[in-house]
Image (cartoon, rainbow, N blue to C red):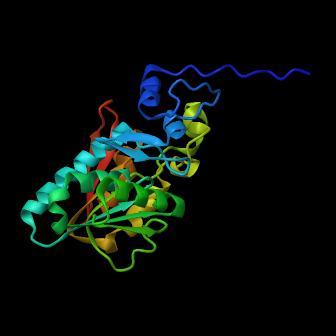
Amino acid sequence: MHMIQQPLRQFSPREQTHLARYAADPLQKTTTTAPVEYLTGRAEFCDFVLAVNKTVLIPRIETEELVALVASAISEKLSSESAKLRILEVGTGSGAITIALARQFETKWSKLEFTASDISQSALVLAQKNAKQMLGTDVPITFIQSDLLENLGSQTFDIVVANLPYIPSARIATLDESVRDHEPHAALDGGPDGFSLITRLLDTVLPILKPNASVFLEIDHTHTKSYFANFVKNGWSLQLSKDFANKTRFAQLSPPV
């Protein structure tokens, strides 16, 4: 009985470039459909390279735009507030967002405190490794294992940023096989409408927000203003913005005054 041999994978030009930069064998032959970032253990984000593995989502280019939105808010708050600015990332994964922000404001570390949380201990180990390699041991980042905000105690923050799972459950099966079959579903699946974890976060975030705080979220393109209606009704301000593909992708909220 003969086994059916799988055809060797044909890499796209982008994948070939990635392998040439980071793979021990850039001409490797394989049948796997795994993202090349998992094959090399490296992912490019903003202007640096992160270690990644199958326990974390590969950071997307859209999330670089989220970093830019938060960076703008940090700059504004640094210019108007004398107290130390406290920034929380919920669901840090590889640490990409927090590390990118800390890199951008490296000359302002004396005025900043970052906290990065994740429910996955293995993700936190990787995020800490990335932070140390990118920024050294003096970077002002505290890593905390937490299911959303459960283990944060009485801490309060000026900025909260989160790129939580936001893909509606039924859409997971339609994703490209490189994502569907290899990236962690826990980092993708946002429940029936993709809004389950976002709702949980917004329902519990108010006690940890300082006055004039801001919450930044990456969201699904289907998450229109109607999804935030109850929060707006209760006095939250909301601003939605689009990504480079002209799809609704980001939400900025401020709590009731």
Count of labels in the image: 0
User: Is residue 211 shown above or below 51?
Assistant: below
In the image, residue 103 lies at what x, y percent?
Answer: 24, 53
Residue closest to the eye, 149 or 179 = 179
Q: Which residue is drawn at 55% across and 43% down?
A: 183
User: Is residue 133 shown above or below 148?
Assistant: above
Tell me if residue 237 can be seen: no
Residue that lies at the very extreme toward the right in this rendered image: 1
User: Is residue 7 shown above or below 104?
Assistant: above
Residue that lies at the very extreme toward the bottom in this rendered image: 154
Q: Residue at x 42, y 58 (%)?
A: 129
Residue closest to the eye, 175 or 251 = 175
Q: Residue at x 37, y 50 (%)?
A: 96
Q: Which residue is drawn at 45% across and 65% down?
A: 148
In the image, residue 92 lies at what x, y percent?
Answer: 41, 57
In the image, residue 37 lies at what x, y percent?
Answer: 48, 38
In this picture, residue 131 sits left or right of residue 174 = left
In this picture, residue 25 sits left or right of residue 75 = right
Image quarter where the C terminus lies is bottom left
Residue closest to the eye, 212 or 44 = 44
In this picture, residue 10 sits left or right of residue 62 = right
In the image, residue 139 lies at what x, y percent?
Answer: 28, 64
Tell me if residue 15 can be seen: yes
Image quarter where the N terminus lies is top right
